[in-house]
Image: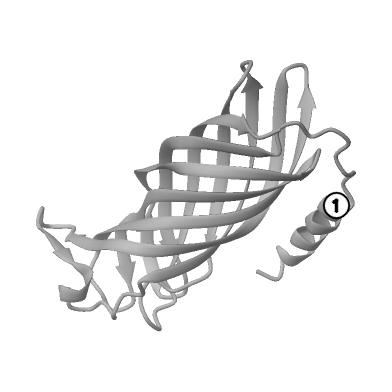
């Protein structure tokens, strides 16, 4: 976390100094997003863990404070967890998590030849809607709270999203690709030091609104 702090401060200062919009004709964008995730868990309590693939889908909005600066808010369903996860003094299990994720971001965008690029960072709050485990030697799944060796699950999760995206202007809408990393700040289970970490690769479609 300490290593990321200087980059976050530098980006925030750069965004704060971005020029104000002279003629922002569409200050608001709304859109849909969907794609794939690859996730795992880390922390001092994890002795083994592989990455696993999942899905992400939802909606988002962007409000332009200036021509090149915007605030973004997403509402996504997202799968996280990891395969072959082993915790201290525990058996190897697959961990399957689902969240409703609400990232709030601040971003910087540039336009060139019908394309737009953006770079952003922010803070996300997620609400866990499913937590299941599957033993390495069994095809049966069980709720996390019913599994021996796991502490009580936390139903909320804080994380830092940062990433970049590219959009193609289609004349009335935009179609793009976004790559995002989610750095988990919260323990998945109480007092466990097991934290989510995931990449999200999504397609985004947006429509400018307002004038």
Picture quadrant where residue 179 is located: top right
Picture quadrant where residue 12 is located: bottom right
In the displayed structure image, the side of residue 184 where residue 12 appears, left or right: right
Q: Position of residue 143 (x, y in %)?
A: 18, 67
What residue sits right under mark 1 in the picture?
A: 14
Q: Position of residue 60 (x, y in %)?
A: 52, 43
Q: How many labels were placed on the picture?
A: 1
Q: Position of residue 210 (x, y in %)?
A: 66, 35
In the displayed structure image, the side of residue 202 where residue 166 appears, left or right: right
Query: What is the secondary structure assignment of the residue under circle 1?
Result: helix
Q: Residues within 10 Å of mark 1 (few under 14, many from 20)?
A: few
The coloring applied to the image is one colour
Name of the residue lying farthest toward the bottom: 191
Residue in the image at 37% along x and 81% along y:
190
Residue in the image at 62% along x and 33% along y:
209
In the rendered view of the protein, which quadrant contains the C terminus?
Answer: top right
Residue in the image at 29% along x and 80% along y:
151
Residue in the image at 24% along x and 64% along y:
92
In the displayed structure image, the side of residue 121 where residue 193 appears, left or right: left
Q: Position of residue 83 (x, y in %)?
A: 30, 54
Name of the residue lying farthest toward the front: 211
Picture quadrant where residue 171 is located: top right
In the rendered view of the protein, which quadrant contains the N terminus?
Answer: bottom right
Q: Reply above or below: 200 against 47.
A: above
Q: Nearer the viewer, residue 198 or 29?
A: 29
Q: Nearer the viewer, residue 10 or 127?
A: 127
């Amino acid at each position: 976390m300490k290593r990321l702090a200087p980059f976050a401060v530098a980006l925030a200062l750069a965004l704060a100094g971005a020029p104000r919009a002279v003629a922002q004709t569409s200050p608001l964008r709304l859109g849909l997003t969907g794609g794939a995730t690859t996730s795992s868990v880390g922390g001092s309590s994890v002795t083994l863990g592989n990455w696993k693939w999942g899905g992400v889908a939802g909606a988002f909005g962007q409000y332009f404070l200036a021509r090149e600066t915007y605030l973004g808010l997403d509402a996504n369903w997202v799968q996280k967890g990891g395969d072959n996860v082993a915790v201290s003094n525990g058996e190897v299990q697959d961990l399957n998590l689902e969240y409703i994720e609400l990232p709030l971001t601040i971003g910087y965008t540039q336009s060139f030849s019908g394309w737009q690029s953006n770079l952003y960072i922010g803070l996300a709050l997620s609400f866990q809607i499913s937590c299941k485990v599957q033993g390495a030697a069994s095809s049966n799944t069980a709720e996390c709270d019913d599994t021996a060796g796991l502490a009580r699950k936390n139903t909320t999760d804080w994380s830092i999203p940062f990433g970049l995206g590219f959009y193609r202007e289609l004349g009335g809408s935009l179609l793009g690709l976004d790559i995002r990393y989610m750095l988990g700040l919260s323990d998945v289970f109480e007092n466990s030091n097991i934290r989510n970490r995931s990449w999200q690769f999504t397609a985004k479609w947006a429509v400018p609104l307002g004038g």
